[in-house]
Image: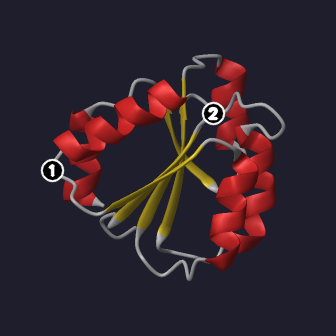
Amino acid sequence: MPIPQRFILVDDNEADNVYHEIMIRRAGFTGEVHVFESGADALAFLRVDELTVPTCLFLDINMPQMDGFEFARQARPLLQDKPTMLVMMLTSSDAPQDRLRAGDMPLIRGFVTKPLTRERVREMLQTG
């Protein structure tokens, strides 16, 4: 995966989104950060986006209407052949069954327990 030039946060918790965007910025990232409070809104964006910019999408598990697993299921046809997209769970869940389920989904390439740290973002920005 190339170094991310854009981040997408998909989380229904506004405070978490604000905090995580701050951590992304404090890590030195100056590019685009898109925030969506629902999986449906994020899917709508991905359907019209060209998906050519190296992007890291952080996805919460526990959201109303469409949880992170359902989002990943629906987004897979859009993203599965896009080497520029990195989809990672970013969740407060530390349940082993959630980690295993995420690991079984081909679209999900990582699992990060909240809160996101600037050190974790710096790692991503240095190694891609």
Q: Earlier in the sequence, mark 1 or mark 2?
A: 2
Q: Residue visible at 56% across and 83% down? A: 50
* Number of residues whose C-alpha sits closer than 10 Å to that of mark 1, classed few (under 14), some (14–19) or many (20 or more): few
Specify the quadrant that holds the C terminus.
bottom left
Q: Residue visible at 42% across and 76% down? A: 53
- Where 23 sits versus 25, above or below? above
Position in image of residue 117 (x %, y %)? 29, 30
Position in image of residue 47 (x %, y %)? 70, 73
Residue type, mark 1 in image: Gly
Position in image of residue 74 (x %, y %)? 80, 58
Q: Is residue 75 found left or right of 18 in the rendered image?
A: right
- Where 17 sits versus 98, above or below? below
Q: Report which quarter residue 121 is drawn in.
A: top left
Q: Residue visible at 84% across and 37% down? A: 65
- Where 5 sits versus 94, above or below? below
Q: Report which quarter residue 67 is drawn in.
A: top right
Tag 2 residue: 12
* Number of residues whose C-alpha sits closer than 10 Å to that of mark 2, classed few (under 14), some (14–19) or many (20 or more): many
Tag 1 residue: 28
Q: Is residue 113 visible?
A: no
Q: How is the image coloured?
A: secondary structure
Residue type, mark 2 in image: Asp
Q: Element at badge 2?
A: loop
Marks 1 and 2: which is nearer the front? 2
Q: Is residue 67 visible?
A: yes
- In this orientation, which residue lies closer to the viewer: 36 or 90? 36
Q: Is residue 4 found left or right of 63 in the rendered image?
A: left
How far apart are labels 1 and 2 at the CA level?
25 Å
Q: Residue visible at 78% across and 31% down? A: 64
